[in-house]
Amino acid sequence: MHANIVDGRDQWFHGTLHAGNHIFGKAPMQQQRVIIALVGDRNPANRTHLATEEAFTDAPDAPAIEWLATERLSEPGAIDLTRYAGLLITPGSPYRSMDGALAAIRHAREHQVPLLGTCGDFNT
Protein backbone atom coordinates (compact mmCIF):
# COMPACT_ATOMS: atom_id res chain seq x y z
CA MET A 1 0.00 0.00 0.00
CA HIS A 2 1.38 3.41 -0.98
CA ALA A 3 0.29 7.00 -0.52
CA ASN A 4 1.46 10.16 -2.16
CA ILE A 5 2.92 12.28 0.59
CA VAL A 6 3.46 15.92 -0.27
CA ASP A 7 6.46 16.54 1.91
CA GLY A 8 9.30 15.15 -0.12
CA ARG A 9 8.25 11.52 -0.56
CA ASP A 10 6.67 10.37 -3.80
CA GLN A 11 4.43 7.34 -3.76
CA TRP A 12 0.92 7.23 -5.23
CA PHE A 13 -2.58 5.89 -4.84
CA HIS A 14 -4.39 6.12 -8.18
CA GLY A 15 -8.08 6.55 -8.79
CA THR A 16 -10.55 7.94 -11.27
CA LEU A 17 -14.09 9.16 -11.15
CA HIS A 18 -16.40 8.38 -14.01
CA ALA A 19 -18.19 11.66 -14.65
CA GLY A 20 -21.40 11.76 -16.65
CA ASN A 21 -23.53 9.06 -18.23
CA HIS A 22 -26.32 8.53 -20.74
CA ILE A 23 -29.07 9.97 -18.51
CA PHE A 24 -31.23 12.56 -20.31
CA GLY A 25 -29.58 11.74 -23.63
CA LYS A 26 -26.23 13.23 -22.70
CA ALA A 27 -23.12 11.60 -24.08
CA PRO A 28 -20.72 10.16 -21.52
CA MET A 29 -18.04 12.55 -20.34
CA GLN A 30 -14.36 11.75 -20.19
CA GLN A 31 -12.95 10.11 -17.09
CA GLN A 32 -11.68 12.72 -14.69
CA ARG A 33 -9.06 12.06 -12.04
CA VAL A 34 -10.22 13.12 -8.61
CA ILE A 35 -7.68 13.79 -5.88
CA ILE A 36 -8.56 14.04 -2.19
CA ALA A 37 -6.06 15.71 0.15
CA LEU A 38 -5.42 13.99 3.47
CA VAL A 39 -4.39 16.87 5.73
CA GLY A 40 -2.21 15.66 8.57
CA ASP A 41 1.18 14.39 9.54
CA ARG A 42 1.31 10.82 8.25
CA ASN A 43 2.82 8.30 10.59
CA PRO A 44 3.14 4.72 9.27
CA ALA A 45 2.93 3.45 12.88
CA ASN A 46 -0.48 5.11 13.32
CA ARG A 47 -3.15 2.48 12.61
CA THR A 48 -5.79 5.12 11.86
CA HIS A 49 -3.58 6.58 9.11
CA LEU A 50 -3.18 3.16 7.52
CA ALA A 51 -6.91 2.45 7.87
CA THR A 52 -7.74 5.81 6.25
CA GLU A 53 -5.55 4.96 3.27
CA GLU A 54 -7.07 1.49 3.03
CA ALA A 55 -10.60 2.88 3.13
CA PHE A 56 -9.87 5.00 0.07
CA THR A 57 -8.36 2.13 -1.90
CA ASP A 58 -11.04 -0.48 -1.19
CA ALA A 59 -13.71 1.10 -3.39
CA PRO A 60 -13.83 0.57 -7.13
CA ASP A 61 -12.94 3.82 -8.91
CA ALA A 62 -11.52 5.16 -5.66
CA PRO A 63 -10.14 8.69 -5.82
CA ALA A 64 -6.44 9.33 -5.67
CA ILE A 65 -5.24 10.53 -2.28
CA GLU A 66 -2.32 12.69 -1.30
CA TRP A 67 -1.06 13.37 2.20
CA LEU A 68 -0.37 17.04 2.91
CA ALA A 69 1.95 17.66 5.83
CA THR A 70 0.68 20.43 8.09
CA GLU A 71 4.11 22.05 8.31
CA ARG A 72 4.15 22.56 4.53
CA LEU A 73 0.60 23.93 4.59
CA SER A 74 1.70 26.63 7.03
CA GLU A 75 4.07 28.02 4.37
CA PRO A 76 2.05 30.47 2.18
CA GLY A 77 1.84 29.18 -1.38
CA ALA A 78 3.87 26.01 -0.69
CA ILE A 79 1.04 23.69 -1.81
CA ASP A 80 -1.61 24.45 -4.45
CA LEU A 81 -4.84 23.41 -2.75
CA THR A 82 -6.96 24.22 -5.82
CA ARG A 83 -6.09 20.84 -7.38
CA TYR A 84 -7.97 18.87 -4.71
CA ALA A 85 -11.64 17.91 -5.04
CA GLY A 86 -11.97 17.59 -1.26
CA LEU A 87 -10.01 17.71 1.98
CA LEU A 88 -9.98 15.22 4.85
CA ILE A 89 -8.58 16.43 8.17
CA THR A 90 -7.04 13.19 9.36
CA PRO A 91 -6.81 11.61 12.80
CA GLY A 92 -3.62 12.25 14.70
CA SER A 93 -3.71 15.64 16.36
CA PRO A 94 -1.97 17.51 17.76
CA TYR A 95 -0.57 18.35 14.36
CA ARG A 96 2.98 19.55 13.84
CA SER A 97 1.45 22.82 12.63
CA MET A 98 -2.07 23.72 13.70
CA ASP A 99 -1.68 26.85 11.54
CA GLY A 100 -1.16 24.58 8.53
CA ALA A 101 -4.26 22.51 9.30
CA LEU A 102 -6.28 25.71 9.79
CA ALA A 103 -4.97 27.11 6.47
CA ALA A 104 -6.37 24.05 4.67
CA ILE A 105 -9.70 24.40 6.49
CA ARG A 106 -9.83 28.10 5.63
CA HIS A 107 -9.18 27.29 1.97
CA ALA A 108 -12.04 24.76 1.96
CA ARG A 109 -14.43 27.26 3.55
CA GLU A 110 -13.49 30.17 1.30
CA HIS A 111 -13.50 28.14 -1.93
CA GLN A 112 -16.45 25.85 -1.14
CA VAL A 113 -14.33 22.70 -1.26
CA PRO A 114 -15.86 19.67 0.50
CA LEU A 115 -14.19 19.04 3.85
CA LEU A 116 -14.51 16.24 6.38
CA GLY A 117 -12.84 16.63 9.75
CA THR A 118 -12.21 13.48 11.75
CA CYS A 119 -9.78 14.94 14.25
CA GLY A 120 -8.54 18.29 15.50
CA ASP A 121 -11.69 18.66 17.63
CA PHE A 122 -14.03 18.07 14.66
CA ASN A 123 -15.35 14.97 16.40
CA THR A 124 -16.60 16.68 19.56
Image (tube, grey):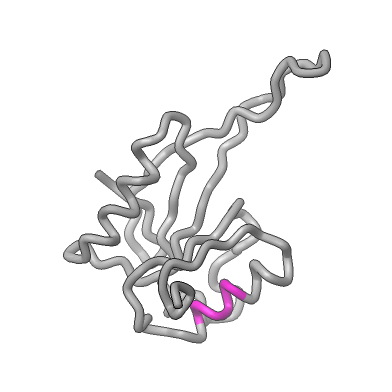
The quarter of the picture where the N terminus appears is top left
Q: Residue 59 in the image: state x and y as whole percent.
A: 40, 34
Residue at 42 percent across and 84 percent down: it is 97
Q: Quadrant of the C terminus?
A: bottom left
Q: Quadrant of residue 32?
A: top right
49 vs 90, left or right, is: left
Residue 38, compared with residue 85, is above or below; it is below
| Relative side of 98 to 31, left or right | left
Judge whether residue 46 is colored magenta: no
Rendering quarter of residue 87: bottom right
Q: Nearer the viewer, residue 90 or 41?
A: 90
Magenta part mainly helix, strand or loop? helix
The image quadrant that residue 118 belongs to is bottom left
Q: Is residue 22 left or right of residue 96?
A: right
Boundaries of the magenta span = 100-105
Tell me if residue 66 comes above or below residue 89 in the rendering. Answer: above
Residue lying farthest to the left in this orientation: 45
Q: Position of residue 11 (x, y in %)?
A: 33, 49
Indicate the position of residue 71 as horizontal and vertical percent values: 42, 79
In this view, 38 is above or below 95: above
Which percent across, then down, holds residue 98?
46, 85
Residue at x-position 36% and y-position 40%: 57
Kindly give the residue lying farthest to the right in the view shown. Answer: 25
The residue shown at (37%, 81%) is: 95
Task: Please tell me which residue lies in front, 120 or 11.
Answer: 120
Q: Count the labels in the image.
A: 0
Question: Looking at the image, which residue is at 55% across and 80% down?
Answer: 102
Q: Of residues 15 and 79, which is closer to you in this image? A: 15
Q: Is residue 103 magenta?
A: yes
